[in-house]
Amino acid sequence: MGVGGTLEYLSDLVNNSGHKHKKKKQLQTVELKIRMDCDGCELKVKNALSSLTGVKSVEINRKQQKVSVTGYVEPNKVLKKAKSTGKRAEIWPYVPYNLVAQPYIAQAYDKKAPPGYVRNVDNNPSSTGTATKYEDPYTNMFSDDNPNACSIM
């Protein structure tokens, strides 16, 4: 390490002695569903989201009611800013149809979803139903494990 590198290292130590390092935000894309009817609504949403710090681009698809915000942003802050425009906004609830195991179950199928998309649901087997083993009631009726087996006779 040369003299320049040492001086830089020491100046960083002196300048940041009492401050913690902030974690750098990662570049990400936040997708929102926002109801927009006209060019004015679209422009209002685009201007509001573009004013956030860290936003690199805002893409709007009015037909799908979808807004994609790319940048060094947090999803909650983007959602809050979108709601501040007076529009109903939520995190994009849909996933492509081919990524869901059972796209036409009641929880996933949504008539309002854009073509090729279904609502994002958990793939837990407990949410889609539980498998129960069928037991014949007559086999238990005369079982030695059943304390009430003799009550029939």
Image (cartoon, grey):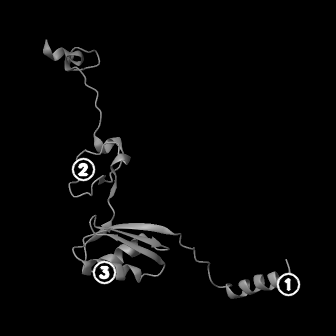
Q: Where is residue 106 in the image (x, y as percent from the top left)?
A: 22, 47
Q: Quadrant of the C terminus?
A: top left
Q: Residue 43 carries which label?
A: 3
Amino acid on which the number 1 mark rests in the picture: Val
Q: Where is residue 120 in the image (x, y as percent from the top left)?
A: 33, 54
Q: Which mark is residue 72?
A: none
Q: Which mark is residue 3?
A: 1
> What is the C-alpha distance between the residues marked 2 and 1?
65 Å
At mark 3, the secondary structure is helix
At mark 2, the secondary structure is loop
Residue identified by numbered label 2: 109
Amino acid on which the number 3 mark rests in the picture: Leu
Looking at the image, is mark 3 or mark 1 earlier in the sequence?
Answer: 1
Residue 142's image quarter?
A: top left
Looking at the image, is mark 2 or mark 1 earlier in the sequence?
Answer: 1
Q: Position of residue 62 (x, y in %)?
A: 28, 69
Q: Quadrant of the N terminus?
A: bottom right
> What is the C-alpha distance between the residues marked 3 and 1?
53 Å
Few, some or many residues within 10 Å of mark 2 (<14, 14–19, 20+): some
Residue in view at x 65 percent, y 85 percent:
18
Q: Which residue lies furthest to the right in this view?
A: 2
Is 16 positioned to the left or the right of 104 in the image?
right
* 60 up-or-down from 20: above or below: above
Residue in view at x 67 percent, y 84 percent:
16
> What is the C-alpha distance between the residues marked 2 and 3?
31 Å
Q: Nearer the viewer, residue 145 or 99?
A: 99
